[in-house]
Image (cartoon, rainbow, N blue to C red):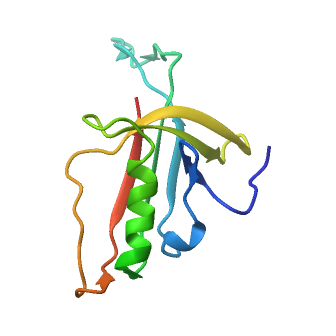
Amino acid sequence: MAFNGQWYIKVGNYPIPLEYMALGTYKSAPLQRQDNDSYVDADGYLHRNPMPHMRSKLEFETPYMYVGDFRKLINGIVANYTSALERKVHLTYYNEEYDRYDEGDFYLPGTVEFLYYNENIMEKNRIAFIEY
């Protein structure tokens, strides 16, 4: 199914609205290939051992937004954690390489920071998902 024009990422049953993604900040790296013990031989030839599991990474920045709208975004993500300890989620995401939607288990990496412009407005915040 080609891009539906409404969302790139759906966290569980919560589609992230496009207006919550700052223009020009959405980055998608679908199906990144992984190698296991690949090497270059003495003649300079590369011998690859690609693994069957491919991992995707998706990220975007939010625009400046009201705290209430930001809460809707974060609450939508948190409500769909499959493991709060790991910040693990099940995503459906648009895969540009094959012009279709794919699914996978992802996590929100490292430290999540929330930046405030003032008491009513959030700064731009980066949100990333990395596949297991």
Examine the rendered structure and indicate whether residue 40 appears above or below residue 29: above
Question: In what quadrant of the picture does the C terminus appear?
Answer: top left
* Relative horizontal placement of residue 61, taking residue 93 as reference (left or right): left
Examine the rendered structure and indicate whether residue 23 appears above or below residue 41: below
Count of numbered badges drawn on the protein: 0
Farthest residue, direction right: 1
**Residue 28 % position (x, y):** 52, 51
**Residue 39 % position (x, y):** 35, 16
Query: Which residue is at a point 66% across and 43% down the rendered structure image?
Result: 97
* Relative horizontal placement of residue 15, taking residue 127 as reference (left or right): right
Question: In what quadrant of the picture does the N terminus appear?
Answer: top right
The residue nearer to you, when weighing 38 against 75, is 75
The image quarter containing residue 107 is: top left
**Residue 123 % position (x, y):** 30, 79
Examine the rendered structure and indicate whether residue 75 appears above or below residue 67: above
**Residue 65 % position (x, y):** 41, 81
Query: Which residue is at a point 37% across and 58% down the rendered structure image?
Result: 127
Query: Which residue is at a point 39% across and 71% down the rendered structure image?
Result: 70
* Relative horizontal placement of residue 51, taking residue 128 as reference (left or right): right
Query: Which residue is at a point 72% across and 40% down the rendered structure image?
Result: 98
The image quarter containing residue 80 is: top left
